[in-house]
Image (tube, rainbow, N blue to C red):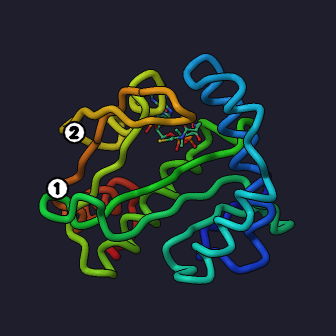
Amino acid sequence: MSAITIRPARPGDASRIARLDVEIWQATYAGILATPFLVGLSAPRRERGWAGVIEREPRDVRVAVDDDGDILGFGSCGRGRDKAEFAGEVFTLYVAPDWQNQGIGRRLLLALFERLVAQGCGSAIIWVLRDNPARFFYQRLGGSDVRHRVFTVGGKPIEAAGYAWRDLPRFLGTAAQADGRPEP
Ligand SMILES: CC(C)(COP(=O)(O)OP(=O)(O)OC[C@H]1O[C@@H](n2cnc3c(N)ncnc32)[C@H](O)[C@@H]1OP(=O)(O)O)[C@@H](O)C(=O)NCCC(=O)NCCS
């Protein structure tokens, strides 16, 4: 089995991230978001968005790559929209369907948390659609269900849950011990 590495994004990654982004949205949100909205997602449009994010701050985007450099998953983070309570936020976290449940999501999430701590963010929140089973992944990874709100996605109101980690350095220390590797 090939080794999987987590690294900061590079400008050349935007196209692959965008294609994966659209593919995963269509697989994950079928039955949750409106079909015309999902069908209308455009990889070239998303590529422009990702290129801008990577250009602004490549360290805020992490990708999981195999030995051939192929991107299997990605995530992004930054300063929180609700800074008063949670300094940091994870904006996206997606693993390609064939690669889910193999530990990549966990490694990406820890890399994003490490990035947030390096930026001085001691806490973080992640918003997940209420009907997305991924919220149990965040629960498994120690997040607490702290907020509920309604977002408008594709013109449709959608309930979302906010999962929070109030002490990221402590959480990373515990995760490192569990993995048997030195604390970051
Ligand atoms: C959610 C997602 C990022 C998780 O990544 P992953 O690589 O599949 O998860 P991992 O293999 O790292 O799982 C880590 C742990 O969480 C558990 N887990 C993963 N998905 C889970 C789920 N849906 N429900 C409950 N537990 C879950 C795993 O069993 C594992 O448990 P362990 O510590 O006992 O081994 C990934 O499945 C994904 O991209 N899903 C579709 C897109 C999505 O919904 N993204 C989130 C948007 S907010």
In the image, residue 131 sits, relative to residue 54, either above or below, namely: above
Quadrant of the image occupied by residue 12: bottom right
Q: Name the foreground residue: 172 vs 48.
A: 48
Local crowd size for mark 2, using a 10 Å CA cut-off: few (<14), some (14–19), many (≥20): some
Local secondary structure at mark 1: loop
Q: Name the foreground residue: 108 vs 177.
A: 108
Instruction: State yes or no: discs 2 and 1 in contact (Cβ < 8 Å).
Output: yes
Quadrant of the image occupied by residue 166: bottom left
Local secondary structure at mark 2: strand
Q: Residue 3 placed where, x, y %?
A: 72, 61
Residue positioned most to the right: 68
Q: Residue at x 75, y 70 (%)?
A: 13
Give how far apart the Cα atoms at labels 2 and 1 are: 9 Å
Quadrant of the image occupied by residue 157: top left
Q: Residue at x 40, y 57 (%)?
A: 90
What label does residue 144 carry, if any?
2
Name the quarter where the C terminus is drawn: bottom left
Q: Residue 9 placed where, x, y %?
A: 64, 74
Q: Residue at x 29, y 74 (%)?
A: 117
Q: Earlier in the sequence, mark 2 or mark 1?
A: 2
Residue positioned most to the front: 155
Residue under circle 1? 166
Horizontally, residue 99 falls left or right of residue 146, namely: right
What label does residue 36 carry, if any?
none
Q: Residue at x 52, y 82 (%)?
A: 57
Q: Is mark 1 within 8 Å of ligand 1?
A: no
Residue type, mark 2 in image: Ser
Q: Residue 127 placed where, x, y %?
A: 37, 43
